[in-house]
Amino acid sequence: TKPLNINGLDFKTLPSNRFVIESNEQYIDWRFNNTTLSKSQILLLDILNQNASQRPICFAQTGQTTHKLNLDKYLMHSGLVSLLRFDKETRVNKNPLRVSTKFSYDLLVKENPFQNKFLKGLQKDAEYVGLTQSVLRRQYYYLGQALLEEKDTISAKATVDYVTNMFPARTITNGVYAFSLGKLYYRMGEKELGQSVVKSSINSYINKIEQYMSVTPKRPLIHRYHLDQFFNNLKGMINQLQSYDAPLYKIYNNQFQTIYKRFKGYCIINQLNTG
């Protein structure tokens, strides 16, 4: 195929975006919508092609998705990894994320993996905090959600209880995935627990915004970028509250409108482009 020229450099393009891996008359047949592949992606495809039929292939949960090559429908969440399977997710109107609930529950809840003193000592480490917010809470949310879909409310509550107690907001600030865990409490009928978690998550973003708007930005573009991200996440969480807690939604929506008006004035005073 004709090379793709980018900034004077020629890149070989793919003749097709469809890939197939076969094993014992089973197929992984998927599309990867890139016209070019990086060296790491080529290496990963080769690893899959050479090994998928012989041994388990797992993808680490890192908070990113680019390394999964658009294989999500063939992945099953198993503990803290995603296991590649030859059977494709075909359920209609169901959660597209498949979870090995028994294996994950035994590993992530029953075995109490985060009682280790070494891990508890790392709770103030920035990288550990980031992984907890973006990876661990997300995986427990996926597990709790899957257990609820299987109508195993007892195990679902035990899952959410475990992660919220092991990584409390006073140690690791609640964010969007903690908010999602709070929604699970609502779905279980545990309104007070749900309110506690979602309020902590929303308030954490309000506090971030207040902190950012309390200073004169030294790097305006980056400062504005972070504020936009905070407002987007905050608005998303508040909007979701409508389906779970209408009175609380009304309170936070009014608060959001007030803060956003102040934000517009802050942008004018500090010459931040308001678009």
Image: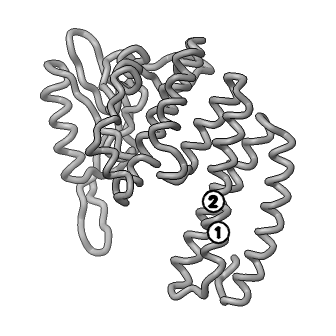
Q: Nearer the viewer, residue 189 or 79?
A: 189
- In this picture, residue 49 sits left or right of residue 185: left
Q: In which quarter of the image is residue 29?
A: top left
Q: Do the residues labelled 1 and 2 touch (CB within 8 Å)?
A: yes
Protein image colouring: one colour
Q: In which quarter of the image is the C terminus?
A: bottom right
Rendering coords of residue 14 (x, y %): 28, 46
**Within-10-Å neighbours for mark 2: few <14, some 14–19, many 20+:** many
- In this picture, residue 147 sits left or right of residue 86: right
Q: How far apart are marks 1 and 2 (CA)?
A: 6 Å
Rendering coords of residue 211 (x, y %): 61, 73
Task: Name the amino acid, label 2.
Answer: Tyr
- In this picture, residue 117 sits left or right of residue 30: left
- The residue under label 1 is 209
**47, above or below 28, in the image:** below
Q: Which residue is drawn at 28% across and 26% down?
A: 20
**51, above or below 32, in the image:** above
Q: Residue at x 35, y 17 (%)?
A: 103
- Secondary element under disc 2, as helix, strand or loop, is helix
Task: Name the amino acid, label 1.
Answer: Ile
Rendering coords of residue 106 (x, y %): 36, 18
Q: Quadrant of residue 69?
A: top left
Image mark for residue 205: 2
Q: Nearer the viewer, residue 73 or 179?
A: 179
Q: Which residue is drawn at 48% across and 39% down?
A: 138
Q: Residue at x 20, y 31 (%)?
A: 48
Image mark for residue 73: none
Task: Spot the residue most to the front.
Answer: 117
- Secondary element under disc 1, as helix, strand or loop, is helix
